Amino acid sequence: MSGAVTPRVAEWLRGARDDPDAFWREAARGIGWFREPERVLDRPDPPSFRWFGGGTTNLAYNALDAQIAAGRGEHIALITLNERGERQTRTYAELLADVERVAAALRGLGVERGDRVTIYMPTCTESIVAMLAVIRIGAIHMVVFAGFGAGALGDRIRACGSRVVLTADVTYRKGTDVELKPILDAALTGDHPVERVVLLERRPGTAPLGELDITWHDFLAGGEGGDGSHEEMESGDPAFILATSGTTARPKLAVHGHGGYQVQIVSMGRWLFDLKPDDVWWCTSDIGWIVGHAYIIHVPMIIGCTTIAYEGALDHPETDAAWRIMASEKVTGVFSSPTAIRSLMRYGDEGPARHDLSTVERVVSAGEVLNPPAWEWLTHGVFGGRVPVIDHMWQTETGGPIFGNPYGVDLLPIKPGSAGIPLPGIEADVVTPDGTPVAPGEKGIMVLRHPFPGLITTLWGEPERYVADYWGRIPGQEVYYVGDAAHVDEDGYVWFAGRADEIIKIAAHRLGTIEVETAFLRHPAVAEAGVTGRPDDLRGEVIAAFVVLKSSHQPSDELRTELLRTLRDELGPIAVVGELTFVDTLPKTRSGKIMRRVLKAVVLGNDPGDITTIEDEGSVEDARDAVDELRAALGAP
């Protein structure tokens, strides 16, 4: 690591490297334990491992009871908002009362320690209460994003063996009531393990009740006078299950426990995001993703600040909705995705300029690479250089960040487009497919050499698949396979180029989807870009590009020529474009990731498969129509 790392950060990283047990033992003191851990890391049979053996804790207890014990009972814990202008608040004392009531109701249904409960609900007060209540009683929740179709939902329910499902009749999205109950009913056809469905009625009486169904009101009534107390959980006991894959393969059910996961995410909340009790923190994610679990709910509450949860689209009902929320709620810290930032960039500077954003102190981003043009717009166009905008990287499987810029320790120079440096306990390496380390600046596949507290230890019901998919991908080496193409520069900063299986191979050259998309974003007319490879008889593959323009620009042949010139100027003659198509929207998941497999299907004329996770189904037809129109104009097949 070069002089880009400050002495304070260098000392911090050195402590983790030289004596990792001592480092993580000290980090574990940052959370509450009923019984202190006897050991830090056990590795009886690598690659298996276990963190903080002998320790007992409870993730939900530390989020609520511990805050009240510290005198923060009347502090606002949670603000829930939605795109219809509805707003609810809960103090820590009020939220604990709600959680205890739902915990008692769950026990009233017969839910016991170790039972699985599926939560298929919007990002609202009741769903967050339910998540905390399930963990509180030692049961295990699996949140399924309220946008997945019946097939994906049913697969997840059956795979984890849920006895109970909590759902709602509708969720709100861009002014529409999206029906959830019919999707759940379709998911529960045939054999399934579900004994009870609890329905939150937002439009009372409109969703018919089946023989398994009970209303939220009756559910709560069934727990009145019951036991809402917490369970003391072993560090490695599961707290929740969360599927990692989309709908293109059998879902991988990642399992996170009470101890190691908690130490990892709380430590990173302090070290990276500098979360403090007086913060008003807004993570714009959905509870259906790991970011929503960790940084809407668990970390802000364990640290004791006010957290905001939002249901709906960030540009609805007005395109400046996100900036209005930041101003009206006096937000101090924001966590959002690069795709959300690029989407807002499309509308220009006028929206943020209409609002007082002076309370915002920092913005962090993860999900995909925060391309330099988007970083520059947010840093300078929105915040006038006053606010650090910090990219970082992690996965569902890692629980919390693994690469980043340690703002809470000492902010390092920001390199736009880089995910930052490997964080404490992360021994990262970039290798060839056969495991040979590559030189600085050379692209390869990112791997991790050792476990760390947030890393999952298994997949639910599939321990062999866990070993094969994560620890057995590099021949002859026991390393964790991250699965992203990347390189490390001379200062030790990590640069991701996209998924390793999304690399575009043009003749003898390999281009990452992220670097091609970033090059397009360098043109001032471009708001978003998505690229994939297209077969080519001469070069093997060429680039197929889909470009979304800012609202101030219109498609034209002249603009297409300019964009091709920009790409060539940025990446050189190796970046050969087979076709460049203008579209209104890109196919993206509701977590904000571009669905490049769908773009590939459009380019090849194939069925895109299951797109129930997509934000806007019309984006697929938009892309297909645009490709057909371009090919017709060019006389191409």
Image: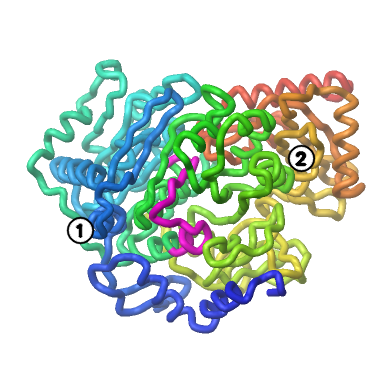
Please state which amino acid type lies under the numbered disc 1.
Answer: Glu
Secondary structure category for the residue under label 2: helix
Identify whether 148 is placed above or below 420: above
- Across and down, in percent, residue 415 comes to 71, 57
Badge 2 crowding class, 10 Å Cα cut-off, few under 14, some 14 to 19, many 20 or more, is many
**Residue, far bottom:** 18
Identify whether 53 is placed above or below 220: below
Count of marks overlaid on the render: 2
Q: Is residue 336 left or right of residue 502?
A: left
Residue 223 is a magenta residue:
no
Quadrant of image for the N terminus: bottom right
Badge 1 crowding class, 10 Å Cα cut-off, few under 14, some 14 to 19, many 20 or more, is some
Which residue has dot 1 on it?
231
Residue under the image location 78 percent in, 24 percent down: 553
- Across and down, in percent, residue 428 comes to 61, 69
Residue stretch rendered in magenta on the structure = 267-287
Q: Is residue 468 visible?
A: no
Residue under the image location 42 percent in, 20 percent down: 177
Residue under the image location 57 percent in, 48 percent down: 363
Closer to us: 595 or 133: 133
Closer to us: 513 or 603: 513
Identify whether 438 is placed above or below 248: below
- Across and down, in percent, residue 378 comes to 66, 42
Residue under the image location 44 percent in, 67 percent down: 453
Residue 271 is a magenta residue:
yes
**Mark 2 or mark 1, which is nearer the start of the sequence?**
1
Please state which amino acid type lies under the numbered disc 2.
Answer: Leu
Residue 200: name its quadrant: top left
- Across and down, in percent, residue 352 comes to 61, 33
**Residue, far top:** 206
Mark carried by residue 521: 2
Residue 516: name its quadrant: top right
